[in-house]
Amino acid sequence: MPEAAARTPYDADALVDVAVRVFLERGYDGTSMGDIARAAGLGKSSIYHHVAGKEDLFERGVRRALDALFAALEEPKCRRGRPVDRLRAVIARTVHIMTEQPAEVALLLRVRGNTPVERTVVERRRAFDRIVTELVLEASKAGEVRADLDPALVTRLVFGMSNSVVEWYRVDGSLRPPEIVAAIDAIVFDGLVP
Amino acid sequence: MPEAAARTPYDADALVDVAVRVFLERGYDGTSMGDIARAAGLGKSSIYHHVAGKEDLFERGVRRALDALFAALEEPKCRRGRPVDRLRAVIARTVHIMTEQPAEVALLLRVRGNTPVERTVVERRRAFDRIVTELVLEASKAGEVRADLDPALVTRLVFGMSNSVVEWYRVDGSLRPPEIVAAIDAIVFDGLVP
């Protein structure tokens, strides 16, 4: 029914926006297509004009975050230069993504690998962590970051810090992304002690 | 029925252990007393010999984490000495608590303040953060930590890093608490750049 679809302001992307919000509020398991339809103000059947179902919405939501994270790795600043500068650039871009897509990243971070789709997501998340761990190792071999810490542990801890931004960041809050990025960069690379 | 109670190996504390695990798996809203009874291998009615209900179990679970965190603030190393050393001690003790009670802390961190009990929990969590923020401010005024970062932001970010430990820490894993504490201390206070 193309005419009906044309009358609604919704497309698949707008539905993913709504679904991500509802998944975060109610949990993926606790969310039905009826919940998403209600939140979108649509009939359940019209949702299926746009997406295949709940898992499709979930996959599109986390894919936004994953695609943004992997795209960051391809940016010139993250690919060229000294390993430590590439690492700084990757972390800065990652934090920006947390502030640009906090809901999608929050959903991504909650994935535990309970279904085949979730396991694929966990695999991509791990692949991203491995790339960054390699970069920490490279920077440490070059003497640009301290060599006395396990690179995989460093990666986990640094992402622990940057990921936590999605828990409290507000688009209309007083803390702006550049200030958050600068604080994380300062703590992680230079430490609190002057 | 004291005899029936005496026959079961469960007391309230053991039930809280089980309930915390089930809450983390299914979410608090998604958990029924029947789920907890099944996980404990008990009849639903025998649970009520020990605890008042689901909210009671939840409250006891998060209270373990909160009590441990507040008790840490009272330890000599966290109360005496230079502000920066007290801050280091508080963070180290906090990370140890993450590894001692990862489930309880994970439950505490998920609380969003949706019910009166949850709001009380959020208030205690904020009170803890405020005490640590004061300590960051004190250390920065003493010139012991850099003064160019917002103390509340520093507190959030450092706890973001240390809280993340509960997401991956395994009692039987190869990373031991002292190594994790040392890595967090090294990154937060000295930074990755040598």
Image (spheres, coloured by chain):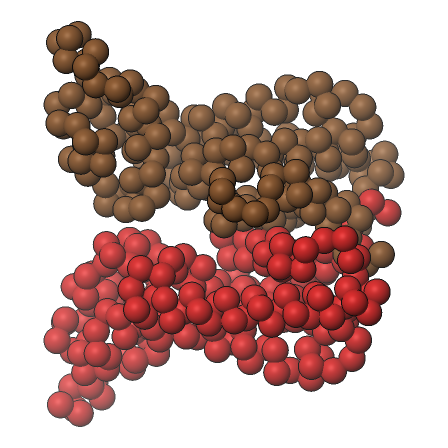
Chain colours: A brown, B red
In the orientation shown, which residue stands out farthest toward the top? Answer: A2
In the rendered view of the protein, which quadrant contains the N terminus of chain A? top left
Residue A162 position by quadrant: top right
- The vertical placement of B47 against A151, above or below, is below
Left of B83 or right of it: where is B128? left
The image position of residue A117, as x and y in percent, is 35, 30
Q: Residue at x 43, y 26 (%)?
A: A63
The image position of residue A182, as x and y in percent, is 71, 42
Q: Residue at x 75, y 46 (%)?
A: A186
- The vertical placement of A33 against B138, above or below, is above
Left of B132 or right of it: where is B20? left
**Nearer to me, A97 or A174:** A174
**Nearer to me, B178 or B76:** B76
In the orientation shown, which residue stands out farthest toward the bottom? Answer: B2
The image position of residue B55, as x and y in percent, is 26, 70
Q: Residue at x 46, y 72 (%)?
A: B124
Residue B83 position by quadrant: bottom right
In the rendered view of the protein, which quadrant contains the C terminus of chain A? bottom right
Q: Residue at x 47, y 30 (%)?
A: A65
**Nearer to me, B44 or A42:** A42
The image position of residue B72, as x and y in percent, is 59, 77
- Residue B129 can be seen, yes or no: yes
- Residue B96 can be seen, yes or no: no
Residue B29 position by quadrant: bottom left
- The vertical placement of B134 against B6, above or below, is above
